[in-house]
Image (spheres, rainbow, N blue to C red):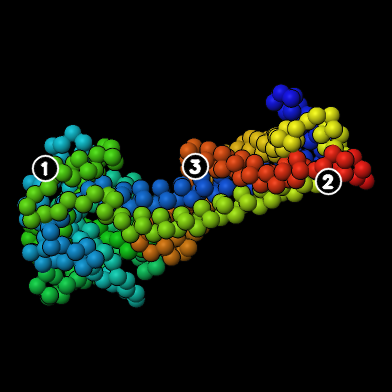
Amino acid sequence: MALSTLSVIAFRDLGRNRRRSILTMVAVALGLALLIALNGLTAGVLEDSLQNSIRLQTGHLQIRNASYQKEKLSLQWKDLLAEPEALAGRANTMPEVKAATPVLWAGGMLNAANESAGVQIYGIDPTSPVFAPIREALVAGQFLTPDDRAGILIGKRLADSLDIGVDQRVTLSLVDGDGRPQEGVFTIRGVFYTGVASYDESAAFMPLAKAQAFSGAGDRASAIVILLKQQNDADKVAAALRAPGNVTLTWRTLNALFLETMQSAMGFYVLFDLIVILVVAVVIANTLLMAVFERVREVGILAALGMKRRQVMLLFLLEAAILGLAGIVLGMAIGLAGVAYLARVGIYIGEDIAATAGNIAISTIMYARFVPGAFLSLAVGTLGVIVLAALYPAWFAARLEPVRALHAQ
């Protein structure tokens, strides 16, 4: 019997109990739609967090002194880069580089009238495109100028927690490279809001020249932060900028902890995907097994008329494939619509929840992202598991003895 004929018979058999077939198809569709939406949302959150980190903190590349350790925020001259302007100028001449600029990092304490908070101080070149995201995130006041000697920028979350705002004076203190405490009075020039809670509550910006003078760093810098036109050029540019005594770190190395954490977490998402697909497969298997019991006499008649066991088995497998394909098409439509909605509107999680992520730069709004390869893999995987789950009902039907099947009640 031709495959086309078996397909027609399988399709007609599914129409005998339309309610059951439709409910089974809907179960497949909803399961796949859920997986597509969750995977799209997960991919969006991971990519958004990585890009936030690159855009606001690490850049695509950093050049540091070989002895510098970021977690210590050292201000000792032996750990800082000498002649940072020359290094940045060399990087800026490369065609792959969008912008490169020196930055000085320091840990400090911001003191308002009644409250205080620990902050990370960023000494920056306000004219550099590297810090355009901060300029664009300004919600009050004005941006810094290179010659400003008394102004700082702080995040909105930090400003709200300390109940301070634009034009107010605050005290900023730190310990310089020689271990001596330094303290100065600064005026808040502006307040920014990036949507990354952990960043908005801990960053304070001032012009690089002021930061160098305030911290006693001289004309040195903690690192050269580099943004590229193409993210994939990181290794090529890093190789070209290597120099004795310095290290050149790519965005992969700079975000290694985040990437490793997310890679481990993806194992749980894969497990969840498998659980949902297996539940859908059980529904399919149950539907087909019920169909076999209902059609025992029919199977016996087909066998008596000369249908071979492999053809009986193929008939039920085709029924499973038809149900699976119909459910997958509907599920893809629902799932992609959900991803499109989440990519445009997103899910607001609030600043407090986002802040619990610590150093992971999660935005307060989670957006989904289209990942065609992952969605296709889910669809193919769902269909494959459905067909595998249908093997037992199909095998059971094929093993029925014609004589006993014809006498079944």
Name the residue beneath numbered marker 2: 293
> Is 2 drawn above or below residue 258 in the view shown?
above
The structure residue drawn at horizontal position 32% and vertical position 64%, both measured from the top left corner, is 202
What whole-number distance in Å separates the C-alpha atoms at marks 1 and 3?
41 Å
* Residue 266 position in % (x across, y down): 46, 54
> Is 180 drawn above or below residue 120 in the view shown?
below
Q: Amino acid at mark 1?
A: Gly
Q: Nearer the viewer, residue 114 or 27?
A: 27
Name the residue beneath numbered marker 3: 374
**Horizontal relation, residue 407 to residue 247: left or right:** right
The structure residue drawn at horizontal position 13% and vertical position 63%, both measured from the top left corner, is 67
Q: Mark 1 and 2 residues: CB-CB less than 8 Å, in contact?
A: no
Q: Amino acid at mark 2?
A: Phe
Q: Amino acid at mark 3?
A: Ala
The structure residue drawn at horizontal position 18% and vertical position 34%, both measured from the top left corner, is 95
**Horizontal relation, residue 153 to residue 356: left or right:** left
Q: Tell me the number on the disc at residue 64.
A: none
- Secondary structure type for disc 3: helix
First-in-chain label (1 vs 2): 1
Whether residue 3 is visible here, answered yes or no, is: yes
Q: Tell me the number on the disc at residue 89.
A: 1
